[in-house]
Amino acid sequence: LGTELYNYFISLYILFIRDPDLVKRIGEATALEVRATGIPYTFAPCIAVCRDPRWGRCYESYSEDHKIVQQMTDIILGLQGEIPVNHTKGVPYVAKNKVAACAKHFVGDGGTHNGINENNTIIDEHGLLGIHMPPYYDSIIKGVATVMVSYSSVNGEKMHANHDLVTGYLKSKLHFRGFVISDWLGIDRITSPAGANYTYSVQAGVNAGIDMVMVPFNYTEFIEDATSLVNKRIISMSRIDDAVSRILRVKFTMGLFENPLADLSFADQLGKKV
């Protein structure tokens, strides 16, 4: 509850002052403290555009106005570091002693019908691209390393199975070169009830363009199903190659091969006043 209230009041404060530089400095402080724990990755920022205050996670959204949310993506520069001049658009960038960021939840999580959490966003192409997509444009320009897919649906199609938006738009149109990660048990929820046909969920999720799947429990089943689907050529090797190359690209950018173990040298900075 304490963390939820903290996030709520931080969001309110940012909403009123609308200060991208402050958000960037919050990102810098967050990166330092996350690194102090030995973790080089954070599932932030949430760049949802909350269109209905009845949505229970509206406090995670910077604003109902996509232009304000776009400005607040400067937190990525705080988390990952300032991108170099002439950095290639879409390629992830993580500076030394920073953390990889994760723009979420792609896409339309703040626009669900009646504000129902993880529900269906009913919207035309103009609305989707004009309201919910712009923060992703900015995040990609700022070198965001990863993007997390939303539990929600767009016009009845689960985002975890939405090839047109994940591969067709995010990867191909916006030239995002980092990796796409599922949400917690995200592919399970492609079916209703969740996990009703797990093999299909693996097929649909990976073929939609998800590169890294969050499997908190039954990882052996995922590995067996994914391997079988590849052997049957239902999931192509080119799809696997794409996923692996994207994950490796981020890992190389983060320097994980040079320094694979947790760096606790910042431990004395944890909770320290600046």
Image (cartoon, rainbow, N blue to C red):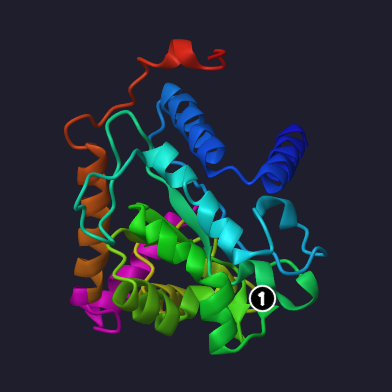
Q: Residue at x 51, y 17 (%)?
A: 270
In the image, the segment drawn in magenta is 215-238
Residue 242: image quadrant is: bottom left
Q: Nearer the viewer, residue 84 or 250?
A: 84
Q: Residue at x 73, y 57 (%)?
A: 58
Q: Nearer the viewer, residue 150 or 170?
A: 170
Across and down, in percent, residue 252 comes to 20, 44
Residue 70 part of the magenta segment: no
Q: Is residue 233 above or below residue 101?
A: below
Q: Nearer the viewer, residue 233 or 167?
A: 167
Amino acid bearing label 1 = Pro
Residue 260: image quadrant is: top left
Q: Is residue 22 above or below residue 267?
A: below
Across and down, in percent, residue 127 comes to 59, 82
Residue 235 part of the magenta segment: yes
Across and down, in percent, residue 160 comes to 50, 73
Q: Is residue 196 above or below residue 271?
A: below
Is residue 43 toward the left or the right of residue 174 in the image? right
Secondary element at tag 1: loop
List the residue tagged with mark 1. Answer: 193
